[in-house]
Amino acid sequence: MGKKGLLSARDFSSLSIKDLLEAREAYHVHLAHLDSVVATAIGRYRIRRGDPDAESPGAPAPSRSTEPRTLSNTVVRHWSWPCVLVFVEEWMTPEQLAHLPEQMVPPLLYLPDGRVVPTCVILAERQQREPAPLRTLAFTSGLVGGGYPALTDVQGRQHLGTFGCLVTDGDSIHALTNRHVVGEPGREVHTLIQGQRRRVGVSHERQVGKRPFSQVYPGWPGSRTYSNLDAGLVRLDDVSGWTAQVFGMGELGPLVDLNGDTLSLDLIGCFVRAFGGASGPLEGEIHALFYRYRSLGGFDYVADLMIGPRQGRGPLPTRPGDSGTLWFFEPRHAPDERAALPTGARARQWRPIALQWGGHRLMTPGGGETYAFALATSLSSICRALDVELVRDWDIGLSEYWGKVGHYKVGITACGLVSNRRLAHLMTANADRISVGDEAIAQGELPGAGTTHFVALADVADLVWRTTRKRDAINHFADMDQPGQGRFAGKTLLELWRTDPSTRSPAVWREFYESIGVKQNSGHGALPFRVWQIHEAMVGFAQRQQVAEFLCAAGLLAHYVGDACQPLHVSFLHHGRPDHADEQDVHAVYETKMLDLRAAELISGVNTRVKGVHVTDTIRGGAAAADAVVKLMQATFDTLPPLEVVEAYNAQTGRQRIPHMWEVLGERTCDCMARGALCLAMLWESAWREGGGTKIPAHLLGPVEPQTLRVLYSDPTFLPSNWLRDLVFQNEAPPPRTTRRERTPTRGGTRGGGARKVARHTTRR
């Protein structure tokens, strides 16, 4: 690697990011006083292309070379050592250093405990240029999204940036870009559509600039270092004109979560791509981490990622106006995957990793080739600082939650299972309001997310409320198999509910979550209490003969009962085992991709299980409704233990994964879904009878206008979504009251011990 003497006798491959940061911190004063040093970063040793070890790790060390090491004549290989990168504006020869030894960058950095960290010196003269004039930008679509230009007017001049993506704070949807792009709160922000400026919103007061590095990355050295987050929000005037897709990229996949536990030097050399509002398509590579771009007043300022051109490719054409651009991780095999997609298959999703906020231009010796670099901040750090969540499914025709196929199949099936003649007439007449038919489900003709059009009720909780009601997120899950701590030591919520009725209250559940270290309200899953709340509301609507309200609540209830019969929604293994990052996609693969591809078989399987069945069992009261859905969760665990879903996911890779998962899990998934539809129909029937719905005149039980239902579910006071701490019920923990025994499908049997098997693998989420 261009190393001699001491360097050739050492192996630095085990050095970590923390080691490199501590070495840079220890030698900061020394490096800062060297006249030629302009910046530092951490990364991997760059090998001259002409050196023997550029092609083989076992090649002999090259002879001493006086050729400057630059970004254009070097490469990074997987055998490159971890090191501190030192950028200098002047390359000094051995003769020059003999006269000025104090200006030499030390090849090794020694730490007090004996650790030794190598340095890699790179010649790169920073070039300052005036921003190029704004060129003509052509964005033809009327649907705005990430990648579109963000325009503001400041002191008589037009400033140009780029919208990164959509995020939500639970109350509203916002566009995310840089703070320096949107400026002070209340400033108007525009974009370009077909060459014409169009206002899209105003700068929001929620912004973040520089944060102490130790706050962003706790436990890592950097006491006098600031991390530049530079993020700001635009409160949108009309979200209906926006899409979560990024122009030139497409659909967003799961966020790449970079933090002190997940960051590693494996990021060096990873391919990334983006679409800049000024530059268009951008293909880059991560060259370094924590690029120290400025030192001022005794403090240092760093960028999380330094993104440059790909090795062997042309320059990275980023330019002023790309601030706010969202960068995406690109697996090196992505082109092959794309080429192999069968006709009609969904295009790949791109996982966002960082938000660009600036750049540097580094010029090679002699004023020759100029290299542009993008400086970017981890998107996960920005979302944490702003307390927002990424919006991935707004007006793109898909949802990434418990698949639409699952929710709509549970809803449409339940419509045909009720017994009361009048209720059956109401649900049948409005089946297309509650859900969509089997044929549409099989063909993938399912509603898209949005607030300006009617969405079938069974998936409103995902397609609408996930972006308009942040607090509703807790109603979609409950980790029933997670063992507690303290006075709940060794007991799960499922066991507590079954054995101690006094624990069936929001207050006790909050205490349980806090016992396992879940302090944030958004982590306090409350699914059974949401069913309790909606059941009581449905009884009241029936008593007051409010048919539209009853129907709307019944359709919305379908979503939560659907969640309760999905094993990964009621388990702490929702995204795989907590210590297995490679399992995080199990949720989406099982409940969305698998069901999408096997929709016809799923429909047939569920229909076979409920053929000729109508519910006759009923319960009374919201507490009994919550108890019924917890029993549904227990039956789901018994039939399909969550750990077995994870194991099936791990058993195969690539194209063989989903066929294998369906072979192992398909029949039992049909069992769970059929049981969920029967439970939902039973809850409808129970609320209808308890509220006296049987007395509602028949002429009131016809189709309800979709617009009437949309107005209801768009009202935040209709079945309000609350944190667990804000829920209060009367008679919170009475003994469950059942008038007749619940009937469930018998096909497929049960698998005892599932919950106990999972519990042995539990850890804090």
Image: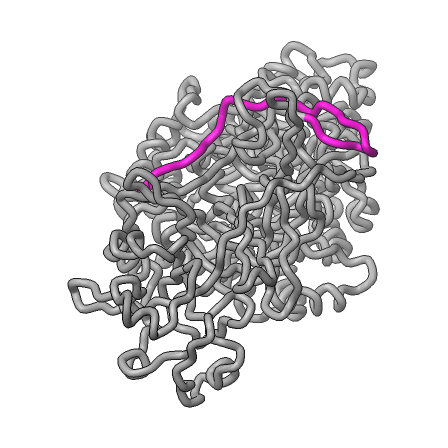
Looking at the image, which residue sits at the far left?
112
Q: Nearer the viewer, residue 459 or 233?
A: 233
User: Observer-nearest residue: 134 or 437?
Assistant: 134
**In the image shown, does 709 or 148 lie closer to the viewer?**
148
Quadrant hosting residue 522: top left
- The question of residue 578 being in magenta is answered with no
**Count of number-bearing discs:** 0
Residue at 28 percent across and 41 percent down: it is 298
The segment highlighted magenta reads: 190-215
Q: Residue at x 54, y 72 (%)?
A: 73
Give the residue at x 61% y 67%: 332
Q: Is residue 467 above or below residue 482?
A: above
> Outermost residue, top direction?
544
Q: Quadrant of residue 148?
A: top right
By what rule are the colours in the image chosen? one colour
Query: Percent from the top left, x then y, of residue 592?
Result: 65, 51
The location of residue 634, given as percent across then percent down, is 48, 46
| Residue 35 location (% of width, % of height) | 34, 55
Q: Is residue 713 visible?
A: no
Q: Which quadrant of the view contains residue 110?
A: bottom left
Residue 743 placement (x, y as % from top left): 60, 42
Answer above or below: position of 588 versus 239.
below
Magenta part, dominant SS: strand
Of the 4 image quadrants, the one containing the N terminus is bottom left
Q: Is residue 84 left or right of residue 592?
A: left
In front here: 21 or 406? 21
Does the segment drawn in magenta span residue 196? yes
Residue that appears at 33% across and 82% down = 4
Residue 120 visible in the current orientation: yes
